[in-house]
């Protein structure tokens, strides 16, 4: 169920996408014309293009055509031998092709970091990043980091690679990040509790979910790029139905073998060759396609034919879910897109009115760096409440360890406890406030609760973690009231809280604030919006 406000927001996103499409492409006919004359459209001479999964299928075809058009192509593949064969095959047809080879296992975040470092060391800039590699695997398969394989390889590995190469992408004029999704995203179940390990052991469902995650990532990356004022494009695409090695493995179970056989039979009828399946990737990489759009074949139920603008599923347009996935992916991978978090990036101006507003918000909130205050709970227990700093990281790690797995899951919506680096940034956010409640007598200095407010634009997102033995004693309510006061004094327009629909204690805590609340539900996640002020900082 989605509230009217969330529905209106989704409609706005779709309308914006349509406007962007109209401004960047004169018509759908123009895109089809570009598709037909693809070779002449590839103006990539002198550019550096990184392509994952480039040793076969559509990745290889995209690499071959970009190399033929004069780009320096970096093959980023898991199997070094097959990658070398692919490079030889390209050079045999195009002797002047400039090919680089970097080994990468997207199922290992250590390997992703090593590959990104190798690319960055060899290339001062990257003009095009095509996140193409994908796999289905077998039920129960996990990456080296312990995540379900489709989520880990198809989404998380590419999320990390993009973030790690962001400096090199920003160093290029109008770089492009192309994320390859699939029509399978339309049958996915949008359930953040399934990230990163689904509870239903269905590999096709997991694959569809990973392709939905690809789109959520691509669209949110576009929103981040726009907010930062960066001249860069995030474009999503899908190849249609292509005869590739995605279904070439030999499944273990009879049921899985039957499923693969059925898909191959359908593919024999409607499938197209990898060279044709690569067209959406190449147009996304080189044609005049606006950021935030989605490309794919337009005929035979989107399985083949000329490339055109696509309208992805409503779930893929869910901005709240995209933000949850973005935050979770950052926590799981330890990779942050810090360059896009600043209000401006060198060479790209932000409107002066917005800068002044941010400055006013920051100035109005400075008074919160105050001395600790005493808090007496209804049961007579005494706590000390103070602003947190990055120096509290070790103590807050202990707080997490002393919370049950259920409490941590409710706080991070199924994600793992943030890594120390992420915790340090959470404790001392560039804009916002983190409060710690410590036991004044029983455990001096030991945090028993943490409340965070992280600002994004003129809204603040709130998170709350209370140690199990201190729950239902009014700690969370008092901390939330203080964050609410902070947000009102600083001039935020609204507070946003995401929680599980089953997290009754949190819902009751918010209800005790006795404020007007707009509540919406997306699957198992409840989004609560508390309207505040007109955006004018009040100070004290």
Image (spheres, grey):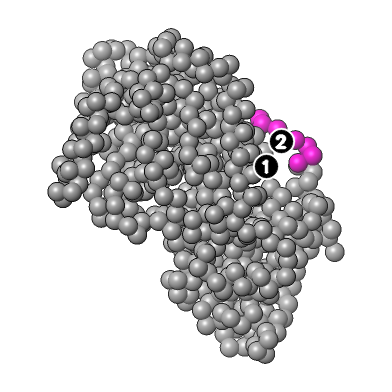
Considering the image in quadrants, where does the N terminus appear?
bottom right
Considering the image in quadrants, where does the C terminus appear?
bottom right
Q: Which residue is mark 1?
A: 343
Q: Residue at x 62, y 67 (%)?
A: 451
Q: Is residue 348 magenta?
A: yes
Dots 2, 1 in contact, CB < 8 A: yes
Q: Compared with residue 350, is residue 303 higher up or lower down, i.e. above or below?
A: above
Magenta segment, principal secondary structure? loop
Residue density around tag 2, few if under 14, some if 14–19, many if 20 or more, within 10 Å: some
- The quarter of the displayed image where residue 339 is located: top right
Q: Which residue is mark 2?
A: 350
Q: In the rendered image, is residue 267 in sight?
A: yes
In three-dimensional space, the C-alpha distance between marks 2 and 1, rounded to whole angstroms, equals 7 Å
Q: In the rendered image, is residue 146 in sight?
A: no
Q: Is residue 198 magenta?
A: no
Q: Compared with residue 86, is residue 330 higher up or lower down, i.e. above or below?
A: below
Magenta range is 345-354
Q: Nearer the viewer, residue 295 or 267?
A: 267
Q: Say what secondary structure mark 2 lies in.
A: loop
């Amino acid at each position: 169920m989605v509230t009217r406000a969330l529905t209106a927001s989704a409609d706005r996103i779709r309308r914006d996408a349509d406007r962007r499409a109209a401004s960047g492409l004169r018509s759908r006919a123009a895109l089809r014309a570009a598709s037909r004359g693809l070779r002449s459209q590839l103006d990539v001479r002198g550019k550096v293009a990184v392509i994952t999964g480039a040793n076969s299928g559509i990745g290889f075809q995209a690499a071959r055509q970009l190399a033929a058009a004069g780009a320096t192509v970096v093959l980023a593949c898991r199997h070094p031998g097959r990658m070398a064969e692919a490079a030889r095959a390209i050079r045999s047809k195009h002797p002047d092709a400039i090919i680089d080879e970097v080994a990468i296992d997207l199922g290992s975040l250590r390997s992703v970091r090593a590959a990104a470092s190798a690319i960055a060391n060899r290339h001062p800039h990257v003009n095009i990043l095509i996140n193409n590699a994908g796999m289905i695997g077998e039920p129960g398969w996990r990456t080296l980091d312990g995540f379900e394989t489709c989520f880990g390889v198809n989404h998380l590995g590419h999320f990390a690679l993009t973030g790690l190469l962001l400096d090199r992408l920003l160093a290029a004029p109008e770089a492009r990040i192309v994320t390859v999704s699939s029509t399978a995203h339309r049958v996915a179940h949008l359930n953040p509790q399934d990230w990163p390990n689904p509870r239903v052991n269905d590999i096709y469902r997991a694959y569809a979910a990973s392709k939905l995650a690809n789109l959520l990532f691509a669209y949110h990356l576009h929103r981040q790029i726009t907010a930062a004022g960066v001249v860069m494009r995030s474009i999503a695409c899908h190849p249609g139905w292509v005869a590739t090695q995605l279904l070439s493995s030999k499944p273990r179970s009879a049921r899985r073998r039957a499923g693969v056989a059925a898909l191959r039979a359908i593919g024999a009828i409607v499938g197209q060759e990898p060279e044709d399946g690569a067209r959406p990737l190449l147009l996304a990489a080189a044609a005049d396609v606006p950021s935030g759009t989605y490309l794919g074949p337009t005929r035979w139920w989107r399985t083949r034919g000329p490339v055109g603008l696509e309208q992805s599923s409503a779930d893929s347009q869910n901005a709240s879910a995209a933000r949850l996935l973005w935050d979770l992916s950052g926590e799981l991978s330890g990779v942050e897109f810090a360059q896009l978090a600043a209000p401006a990036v060198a060479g790209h101006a932000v409107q002066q009115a917005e800068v002044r507003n941010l400055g006013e918000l920051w100035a109005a909130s400075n008074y919160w760096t105050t001395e600790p205050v005493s808090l007496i709970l209804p049961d007579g227990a005494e706590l000390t409440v103070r602003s947190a700093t990055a120096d509290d990281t070790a103590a807050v790690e202990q707080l997490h360890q002393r919370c049950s797995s259920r409490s941590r899951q409710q706080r991070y919506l199924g994600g793992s406890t943030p890594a120390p680096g992420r915790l340090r940034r959470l404790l001392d956010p560039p804009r916002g406030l983190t409060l710690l409640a410590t036991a004044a007598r029983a455990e001096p200095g030991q945090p028993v609760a943490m409340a965070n407010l992280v600002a994004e634009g003129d809204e603040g997102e709130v998170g709350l973690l209370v140690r199990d033995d201190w729950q239902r004693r009014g700690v969370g309510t008092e901390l939330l009231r203080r964050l609410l006061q902070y947000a009102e004094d600083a001039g935020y327009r609204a507070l946003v809280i995401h929680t599980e629909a089953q997290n009754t204690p949190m819902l009751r805590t918010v209800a005790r604030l006795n404020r007007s609340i707009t509540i919406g539900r997306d699957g198992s996640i409840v989004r609560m919006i508390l309207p505040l002020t007109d955006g004018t900082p009040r100070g004290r």
